[in-house]
Image (spheres, rainbow, N blue to C red):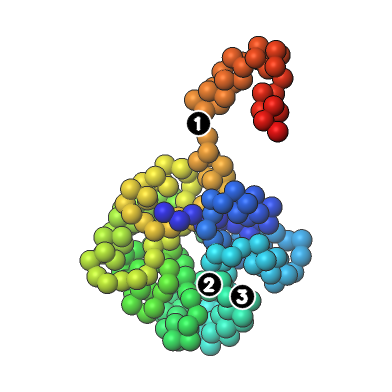
């Protein structure tokens, strides 16, 4: 399973890229608006300098012509740019035009399997089903992932399922068990995925047991230099 980081925060992106555990980045207007320090385009350029994997950048236009204009400008920002378009009729029209130009598109705000099928049909590289927002309104987000993964397997559909709106580490395991190709994860979920109390207890115990040896010999690995 690939992990993308769902953030426009440069230190966070850098931290997880340097650890080698994230394969790409997804942004959206809300995430970019939070990083108010510089012009959003300068900010996106800095993200693109850090990341070699796919970076999703969303249009804000809602009509076909302006979506196309914005998408073409976004695509020029870098080879690894993926344009994010919303799941609307204008969005699908723009997607179809852009896919013929070789521009990769991530269709966002997917809340049903039919929307995912339509986006795949129109040429999406990725579909982003928002599971947390479904859970928020008492619909099971993971059921949607199960349906989309199964439906895409039933046909030669190359569109990748990019699980979005992830709120906790259990959702990552559930999505992985279902065979979803990618999950885009907020930094706090990535942080929580590292944690296990037995790991912390184990380290403390090893260090406590080692104290006497360290006092006698110092750092034993220094003798290897
Ligand atoms: O990037 C889109 C999605 O992951 C947003 O998540 O938490 O705002 O529902 P959330």
- The residue lying toward the viewer, choosing from 171 and 4, is 4
**Which percent across, then down, holds residue 203?**
57, 24
Residue 140 visible in the picture? no
Residue at label 1? 196
Residue at figure coordinates x 45%, y 56% from the top left: 2
Cα distance between the residues tagged 1 and 3: 38 Å
Q: Real-space Cα distance between discs 1 and 2?
A: 34 Å
Distance between the alpha carbons at the discs numbered 3 and 2: 9 Å
Name the image quarter holding residue 119: bottom left
Q: Position of residue 133 (x, y in %)?
A: 45, 54
Q: Nearer the viewer, mark 3 or mark 2?
A: 3
Mark 1 touches mark 3? (CB < 8 Å): no
In what quadrant of the picture does the N terminus appear?
bottom left
Do callouts 1 and 2 mark residues in contact (Cβ within 8 Å)?
A: no
Left or right: 75 as drawn, with respect to 136 = right
- The residue nearer to you, when weighing 35 against 102, is 102
**How many numbered circles are shown?**
3
Residue at screen point 69% across, 52% down? 11
Q: Is residue 76 left or right of residue 139?
A: right
The disc label shown at residue 78, or none: 3
Residue at x-position 47% and y-position 83%: 102
| Residue carrying label 2 | 82
Query: Measuring 48% from the left and 76% from the top, which residue is drawn there?
Result: 104
Mark 3 and 2 residues: CB-CB less than 8 Å, in contact?
A: no
Identify the mark nearer the N-term, 1 or 2: 2
Observer able to see residue 158: yes
């Amino acid at each position: 399973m690939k992990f993308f980081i769902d953030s426009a925060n440069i230190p966070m992106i850098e931290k997880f890229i340097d650890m080698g555990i994230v394969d790409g980045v997804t942004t959206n207007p809300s995430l970019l608006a939070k990083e108010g320090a510089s012009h959003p385009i300068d900010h996106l350029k800095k993200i693109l300098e850090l990341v070699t994997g796919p970076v999703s950048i969303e249009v804000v236009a809602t009509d076909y012509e302006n979506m196309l204009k914005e998408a073409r400008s976004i695509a020029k920002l870098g080879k690894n740019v993926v344009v994010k378009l919303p799941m609307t009729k204008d969005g699908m029209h723009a997607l179809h035009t852009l896919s013929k130009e070789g521009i990769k598109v991530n269709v966002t705000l997917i809340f049903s399997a039919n929307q995912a099928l339509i986006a795949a049909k129109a040429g999406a590289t990725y579909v982003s089903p928002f599971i947390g927002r479904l859970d928020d309104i008492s619909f099971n987000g993971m059921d949607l992932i199960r349906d989309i993964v199964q439906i895409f397997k039933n046909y030669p559909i190359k569109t990748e399922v990019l699980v979005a709106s992830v709120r906790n580490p259990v959702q990552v395991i559930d999505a992985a068990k279902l065979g979803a190709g990618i999950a885009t994860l907020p930094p706090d979920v990535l942080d929580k995925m590292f944690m296990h109390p037995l790991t912390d207890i184990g380290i403390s115990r090893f260090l406590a047991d080692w104290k006497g040896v360290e006092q006698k010999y110092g750092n034993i690995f220094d003798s290897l230099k």
